[in-house]
C-alpha cells in the first residue's frame, strides 16, 4: 500500500517500488529500481545466458569447463558472463589450482523474480525519463528514438 511518504513527490516513487517489489518479488538485496529491473530482464532475455545461469545453478565452475559443457566458445561465454555479472546475476572468484594456475570460478548470485503487473506499475516511476537501458544488458543508456 502506498502512503503519502511513498509518492513520487518524495523519492521518485522508489519507496513505493520497494514496497510492491517486496510483496510480489524477492531478491537477496534491496529491490531493484526500474532501470535495474530492465537491465536484469534484458540480460536474461538471451537463450545462451539462460543456459549459463542453469548450468551455474547446478554447480560453480570455470570458463573452459563451462564452455565445453555448453558447446560454445570461451570468448562468447566470457561476453555472456560479463553481462550476467554486470547485472548482478552471477559472481566470479579467482582461485589458484593445485598446479598453481589462476582460475576464475563463476557461480549464480541467488535471486528470485516473481513479476506481476502491480510490480511493474510500482517500478515504472523509477525508470529514467527519455532514456533506456540497452537491450544487451550492458547498462549504458541511449536516447530513445
Image: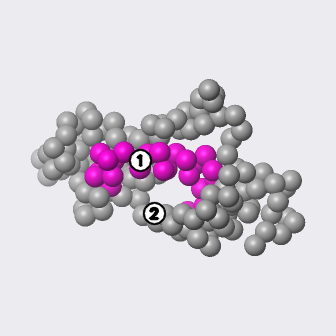
Q: Main secondary structure of the magenta part?
A: helix
**Which circle, 2 or 1, is nearer the viewer?**
1
Q: Is residue 112 visible?
A: yes
For label 1, the crowd category at 10 Å Cα-Cα, with few meaning under 14, some 14 to 19 and many 20 or more, is some
Instruction: Estimate the spatial distance between the alpha carbons at disc 2 and disc 1, rounded to whole Å.
Output: 16 Å
For label 2, the residue is 111
| Circle on res. 45 | 1
Q: Identify the coloring.
A: one colour
Which residue is at a point 19% across and 40% down the rendered structure image? 72
Looking at the rendered structure, the number of numbered marks drawn on it comes to 2
Mark 2 element type = strand
Which residue corresponds to the image point at 27% horizontal and 40% vertical from the top-left?
77
Horizontal placement of 4 versus 29: left or right? right
Disc with the residue nearer the chain's start (2 vs 1): 1
Q: The N terminus lies in which quarter of the figure? A: bottom right
Image point 19% across, 48% down: which residue?
Answer: 70
Q: Is residue 39 magenta?
A: yes
| Vertical position of residue 87 compared to residue 112: above or below | above
Q: Which mark is residue 116?
A: none
141 relative to 43 in the view: left or right? right
Local crowd size for mark 2, using a 10 Å CA cut-off: few (<14), some (14–19), many (≥20): few
Q: Residue at x 63, y 50 (%)?
A: 34
Horizontal relation, residue 110 to residue 12: left or right: left
Q: Give x and y (percent) for residue 40.
A: 49, 50
Tag 1 secondary structure:
loop
For the record, the magenta segment spans 28-53
* Residue 41 part of the magenta-drawn span: yes
Q: Nearer the viewer, residue 129 or 5?
A: 129
Residues at circles 2 and 1 in contact by the CB criterion of under 8 Å: no
| Quadrant of the rendered image containing residue 73 | top left
From the top left corner, tell me how far across and down residue 145 is, in percent: 62, 26
Amino acid at each position: 500500500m502506498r502512503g503519502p511518504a511513498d509518492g513520487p513527490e518524495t523519492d521518485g516513487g522508489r519507496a513505493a517500488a520497494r514496497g510492491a517489489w517486496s510483496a510480489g518479488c524477492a531478491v537477496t538485496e534491496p529491490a531493484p529500481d526500474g532501470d535495474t529491473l530492465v537491465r536484469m530482464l534484458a540480460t536474461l532475455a538471451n537463450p545462451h545466458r539462460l543456459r549459463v545461469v542453469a548450468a551455474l545453478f547446478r554447480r560453480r565452475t570455470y570458463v573452459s569447463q563451462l564452455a565445453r559443457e555448453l558447446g560454445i566458445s570461451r570468448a562468447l561465454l566470457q561476453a555472456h558472463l560479463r553481462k550476467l555479472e554486470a547485472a548482478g546475476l552471477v559472481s566470479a572468484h579467482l582461485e589458484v589450482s593445485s598446479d598453481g594456475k589462476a582460475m576464475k570460478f563463476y557461480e549464480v548470485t541467488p535471486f528470485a523474480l516473481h513479476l506481476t503487473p502491480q510490480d511493474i506499475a510500482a517500478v515504472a516511476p523509477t525508470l529514467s525519463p527519455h532514456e533506456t537501458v540497452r537491450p544487451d544488458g550492458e547498462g549504458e543508456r541511449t536516447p530513445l528514438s
